[in-house]
Amino acid sequence: AGQHKWNFGAGPAMIPRPVLERAQAEFLNYQSTGLSLMELSHRSQPYEDLNNKAQAQLRQLLKVPDNYKVIFMQGGGHTQFAAVVYNLIAWRHHQNGTKGDWRQIPVDYVVTGSWSAKAAEEAKRLGANLRVVCDAKKALGAYTGIPAETTWATSDAHGATRQADDEAGQKPAYLYYCDNETVNGVEFPYVPSLHDPSVPLVCDMSSNILSRPVDISKFGVIYAGAQKNIGPAGVSVVIIREDLLQTSELKDGLPPVALMLDYKTMAKNNSLYNTPPMFAIYISSLVFEWLLDAPSQRVQDGDASIYPHSSFVGVEAAQARNERKASKLYKALEESRFCRIVVQDKAARSKMNIPFRISATPKGDASAIVDKKKDEEMEAAFVAQAEAKGLLQLAGHRSVGGIRASIYNAMTEEGVDVLIAYLKEFESQY
Ligand code: PMP
């Protein structure tokens, strides 16, 4: 009982209330088995059914084409930073007829925030021939937008270099980017176009998967850790085009991939190669069901009247709702005298994670002297008073500070309205 809480945490993030209630109701006795789901064998029929159901739901939500596999893996986003390197270098090495040294095969990274930067670092650490084809921090001074595609070292502007590389057997294994940078609040408003369509596009969608429709056919690999827009930490979703499944083996002159990182092994075994994170997959499946199921969303939102029935369900409806939520919050921040939105490039502003700074110096007052210490105190006060009102986890990522409101699918419009009202109230104190 007590005060209602709104969770603005970036991840682990809010899970829809009807999902938690359903899990609670089924906790001790899963589908009349007399056991909790966690106690079932992962080889049992009820679990196999659940595994298949969760995959089918995700395929339905994202309209995954038949020539793609959906895989559940463990180890979170960080594990995928490594998995893509091993798996796709192995694939490219085979495309090259297993000739040449795998260390020469380029891997191209677009770096637009701290997560793609970390992924690129991991590729380098594993010995890959890393090429950062776009570095937003270098281009813009900070991670506050997405440099135009024409400036990337993969673009037609650099076509000549690329062609020479390709002819020298230097085709990159893949082009990597992060669709939504959770820490920096930078989200791609488009899918990058490829100079060379035979280079697979690899995308980290950890913090915006299922927030909007996506044309899966444009991608080689999409992955997402669950703990933001899907479910609990412990499971990651991988969507991979079948022809990219290639096990790497020592005899091919490649470093062998640990089987747990090997997409082909996971796909071949229907994500049941070893004991999967069953509970995390179960909750994810309930979230998928929630997204596919109109009535439960309607109850949760309490604003059924504004949703026409047919357009209410699925990722399309989630997108409409997410756009409304984000646009009203950005508008409130723009109108505020004290709040500054971190991401300057309006087109690249995330609909999921909204970082902002609070300053005692009102906007537009060029003569005022900025007192950094005072601003930080004000931000701390903002977070503390928010907590007292049940608006939780609004502090920015520890690496950047400030404030960050994460408003994934599970955050209701009402929650965003409550935050906006609090923003105005806080400002009126000063
Ligand atoms: N990628 C993105 C976009 C993320 O937001 C995160 C986590 N915040 C990660 C990767 C890393 O995920 P994990 O903590 O599951 O390794």
Image (cartoon, rainbow, N blue to C red):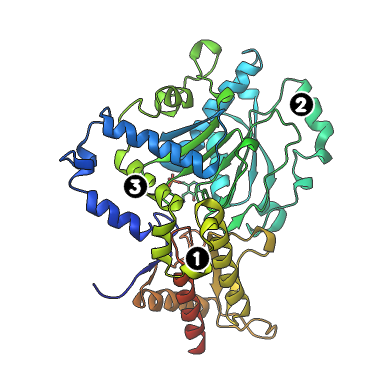
Identify which residue, 60 or 67, lies in the foreground. Answer: 60
Check disc 1 and report the residue beneath it: 404
Identify the mark at residue 337; answer none if there is no mark. Answer: none
Numbered disc in front, either 3 or 2 = 3
Dot 2 or dot 1: first in sequence order is: 2
Count of residue discs: 3
Kind of element beneath mark 3 = helix
Identify which residue, 77 or 323, lies in the foreground. Answer: 323
Kind of element beneath mark 1 = strand
Q: Quadrant of the N terminus?
A: bottom left
Kind of element beneath mark 2 = helix
The answer as to whether callout 2 falls within 8 Å of ligand 1 is: no
In three-dimensional space, the C-alpha distance between marks 2 and 1, rounded to whole angstroms, equals 42 Å
In three-dimensional space, the C-alpha distance between marks 1 and 3, rounded to whole angstroms, equals 26 Å
Q: Given the image, on which type of amino acid does mark 1 rest?
A: Arg
Left or right for 424, reference 100: left
Tell me which corner region of the image, top left, top right, bottom left or bottom right, holds residue 185.
Answer: bottom right
User: At which x and y percent is residue 404?
Assistant: 50, 65
User: At which x and y percent is residue 427?
Assistant: 51, 85
Residue at the image position 41 percent from the left and 53 percent from the top:
290
Check disc 2 and report the residue beneath it: 165
Q: Given the image, on which type of amino acid does mark 2 rest?
A: Asp
Identify which residue, 263 or 297, lies in the foreground. Answer: 297
Q: Residues within 10 Å of mark 1 (few under 14, many from 20)?
A: many
Residue at the image position 57 percent from the left and 45 percent from the top:
116
